[in-house]
Amino acid sequence: MSATMNNLVAPATRIWIRLRLNELGPLISLAGFGFFAWAFMELADDVSEGETHALDQSLLLALRDPANLANPLGPGWLEEAARDITGLGGYAVLAIITWATWAYLMMVGKRGAALLVLVSIIGGTLLSHGLKLGFERPRPDLVPHATQVYTASFPSGHAMMSAITYLTLGALLARVEKSRRTRAFVMGLAVAMTLLVGASRVYLGVHWPSDVLAGWSVGAAWASFCWFVALQLQRGGQVEDPGETSSPEAETS
């Protein structure tokens, strides 16, 4: 009798936990959106009033050789590695990653999720361009730039777009994966890539630290919003649940 009860209670407990997580998901995503959006607005206000300038200068100079401001601290290979990492936040690389993710989702039959990926990344790209045009903050002239730049400084486009792309894709892919370990790996990798790209922009002297922090904030806010939308669409059946496909052909191919 005891064994029978345990066999009944264990599945019921798992179902209850899953239902609770499904209820908490939208609340967590909305809370994340609100927090990161508030952080960006506060930072933008401080930057506009010049309150971050002294700290920005101190941090930027701390990463440079005092005898030669053209040289970042560390060996030559570290500077070269920073250039490679910063390229992971470039538009060409992010476009390839987005296309590859879209193609993968289409091939496994998750067409709703594939469409959501495109809308999320394209929307984030337009948001990034709009914010840069709105603030038009000049690039740092305190130290020589270790890589080419072409746009305004605030917020950091590389930091923002890497956050938007990697965090959004991480959240969306995690929603269509059944394995908890796989979901944790995907989100951990997304966060690590976002942080590395943003840090490389400061190390190379092409952004103030506040630019990167702002890019991370608004990018995380957008990713949280996209996560919330994904959860709502999954509930309505427009985006596939883990293990679900949108066409019988994808399941049998």
Image: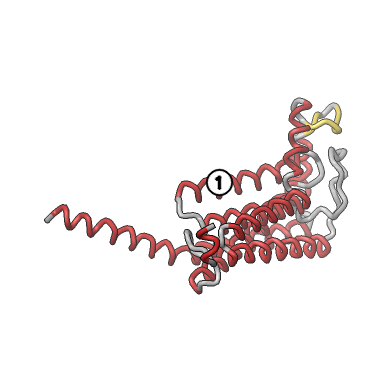
Q: Residue at x 85, y 33 (%)?
A: 69
Kindly tell me whether residue 36 is visible in this rendering: no
Q: Classify residue 10 by image quadrant.
A: bottom left
Q: How is the image coloured?
A: secondary structure
Toward the viewer: 2 or 220?
Answer: 2
Specify whether 220 is left or right of 157: left
Q: Residue at x 56, y 62 (%)?
A: 109
Dot 1 surroundings within 10 Å: few (below 14), some, or many (20 or more)?
some
Farthest left residue in view: 1
Counting from the top left corner in percent of width and height, residue 24 is at: 45, 64
Toward the viewer: 89 or 4?
Answer: 4
Tell me: residue 87, above or below residue 235: above
Residue position marked by numbered label 1 in the rendering: 188
Looking at the rendered structure, the number of numbered marks drawn on it comes to 1
Specify whether 173 is left or right of 102: left
Q: Quadrant of the N terminus?
A: bottom left
Farthest bottom residue in view: 236
Q: Classify residue 195 by image quadrant.
A: top right
Kindly tell me whether residue 20 is visible in this rendering: yes
Three-letter code, disc 1: Gly
Toward the viewer: 124 or 253?
Answer: 253
Q: Quadrant of the C terminus?
A: bottom right
Counting from the top left corner in percent of width and height, residue 238 is at: 55, 71
Q: Residue at x 84, y 41 (%)?
A: 147
Specify whether 102 is left or right of 72: left
Counting from the top left corner in percent of width and height, residue 41 is at: 69, 62
Q: Secondary structure at mark 1?
A: helix
Counting from the top left corner in percent of width and height, residue 241 is at: 49, 63
